[in-house]
Amino acid sequence: MNPFRIFFAPLVFILRLCVQTAFLAIGQIFSRFVRSSLTMFGIIIGVAVVIGTIGGLTGMKGFVLKEFETFGARKMFMWGYVPEDMRTTVSWSDVKLTTYEANIILERAPSIEKLSPICSMRMDANYDGKLVRGVDVSGIWPDWHDIEDRQMIFGRPFSRIDIEENRQVCFVNAAAVDEMKLDTDPTGDYLQLGGRRFLIVGLVETKDLQFMGNGGDAQSEVFIPFETHKMMNPYTWTNFLLQMTDPEQAADAEASIRFILRKHRNLDPEAEDTFQIRMLQSVIEQFNVMANGITLVASIIVGFTLLVGGVGIMNIMLASVSERTREIGLRKAVGAQPLVVLLQFLIEAVVLCVVGGAIGVLIGMGIVTLLRQLVSWMSEAAVPPGWIILAFGACGFCGVVSGMFPAIKAASLNPINALRHE
Amino acid sequence: MSATTAIPTQADAPARAGAAAPATIEIRGLHKVYKIGEERVHALRDVDLTIRRNEFVAIMGASGSGKSTLMNILGCLDGATKGAYVLNGRPTHKMGMGRLARVRNEEIGFIFQSFELLPRASALKNVMLPMLYSAKHLFSARRRAKRSLEMVGLADRMGHKPNQLSGGQRQRVAVARALVNDPALLLADEPTGNLDSKTTVEIIDLFRELHASGQTIVIVTHEEDVAGHAERIVRLRDGEVMSDYPTNDDPVHQDWIERMASGQGSRLEAARDETASVEGAEA
Ligand SMILES: Nc1ncnc2c1ncn2[C@@H]1O[C@H](COP(=O)(O)OP(=O)(O)OP(=O)(O)O)[C@@H](O)[C@H]1O
Ligand SMILES: [Mg+2]
């Protein structure tokens, strides 16, 4: 024998034993195909359901995040608010946000880079002698374009002078062009709003959101400078639309806004805020909480299926051990070590579980592929590799646990008693 | 228990059959008691036995006399209740399950009355089975298995499954399997018990060849003419060694030969004559 062989022999021996045992186990599974399939059924279904759920959840998450991305993850809203216990002493008009407050926020909160107040109202519009009732007219600042990410298609946005001089200028969206039968490029035309003549300075793009906000067919929208709007309708409600420098800055931004406004409004330390702040970050967090909940439920399902499946596997392994007692006896008689017999049955149980898990994963991936193909907004449905590895790992663990007892039983058989067994 | 049992050394062992060959098997004060509930069956009582290298020993006795029990202990398939069993100078009664498995694998070839082949595996795979559990002949397992099958005359049946073989061929596969690891000791518990006279002759002739080439063999048999091929006959009764003679000195066997000579003729002789006449007719 040469040194190479002496060195590698034990390694090859163990490897060969494992490979042969695995093939033996697979042979066993196929030679009792119906029985094996029934045994694996629980594990197959469980793993398929979980993989399907996780894939679907991933699709949903991807979709929601993409929507948020479009919507703007840096976006914040705020509005004046009367807390419950102040309802008798404070009126809603007292807490309305003002342009002064908008300016001090922009000035003093470093994490806020853009802000636009918004007020909106339905007005009658008149173009070329045709009247359209109840058109949505919003008053905005130029920052609105960047915060909403809606740029001009034709024409120009409002200029500083438009704002400062309360000019009667407006721009519209495509739906308004359709509804009021304006020119494709309406720039330069005049529109009557609430009895005043407005110069149309441009056409703004419409954001396509499927999930939140103004979904479906976009409504007609007309925008005018905030100050002009305020002048025409002094009593309309005002919201602020803000943009942070960074989504990570959410908590910081909220804190500084609260500090600035509370100080400006002279609120007592124990008094509640007379305004409210909302940001998408918190919506995402809420969604994540829900997604984690579903993941947890899926994990619990995995646990239970593997438990139930494991009991089935253990049952079948015990049956297999008593059916093959003679064979075990023979193998021991020709010198199979107890450990080797143990390994054989353990590998068989593990192969059974892992094959069941593999079929389950395949079915689950099939479901996910189907989802992706059939449901339009599920285009991101996919099974994270981590979950596939986890599923296999759990199945392998289940195999070891459920195979251990039968394997120990087989390994501790006395060869002669096993051979005599009928 | 066994440690107190003195084992005679090579020097003071009685010279038997003129052989000074080293002992393959040394058994001293062996007892085997089966417990079934409250009941105790004393299957072996105080058995002493020495078998030397290259001996061919037949163990005989009435049904229930403890032959199989003794064989199983010799084959390390079962442990004794009390007593010492030294195989090739190594005390097996002190070994654990793992070491015993190794001894069975490397030093003992065991042949069963009912062959005990794996039904789904080919003859070749069956013969390779012992080598699956040893790192010794890792790179030559297939070659050795083939050579072993050639030795028992089954070169052309290697791919056959047990159910495609005759009883005699199956037993020869079992012999090939028993021999594949070059065991120091070949044990056979009624190897011809399930065979007809013609195939019994085949197997016995195979054993004689093996013995001629130096193999140590112990067989259990009920048949005097099978035992007649051994050099020595050990007779058991009720778990005790009743007699232990070289075949030529065994009074029971000599009686039997005389009876055969004066009439009926043995089953095996008849089978051998028949084969010869068929071969003669073909020639
Ligand atoms: N596993 C066992 N449990 C209990 N008693 C047993 C067991 N095996 C054998 N015996 C008893 O031990 C005694 C010897 O049995 P053994 O099988 O050694 O006899 P044998 O000489 O081989 O007989 P046979 O020629 O019929 O094969 C018998 O009385 C038998 O009933
Ligand atoms: Mg017997």
Image (cartoon, helix red, strand yellow):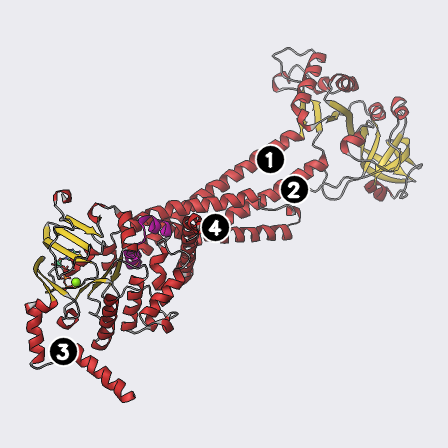
Q: Which residue is mark 2?
A: A63
Say what secondary structure mark 3 lies in: loop
Q: Is residue B116 left or right of residue A289?
A: left
- Amino acid on which the number 3 mark rests in the picture: Ser
In space, the residues marked 2 and 3 are separated at their CA atoms by 92 Å
Between A224 and B236, the one nearer to me in the picture: B236
Q: Earlier in the sequence, mark 4 or mark 1?
A: 1
Query: Residue A168: x percent and y percent?
Result: 90, 28
In the depicted structure, whether residue B75 falls above or below residue A56:
below
Residue B202 among those drawn in magenta: no
Query: Residue A200: x percent and y percent?
Result: 90, 35
Give the residues drawn in magenta, as a range. Answer: A324-345
Say what secondary structure mark 1 lies in: helix
In space, the residues marked 4 and 2 are separated at their CA atoms by 28 Å
Q: Is residue A222 left or right of residue B110?
A: right
Which dot, 1 or 3, sits closer to the camera?
A: 3
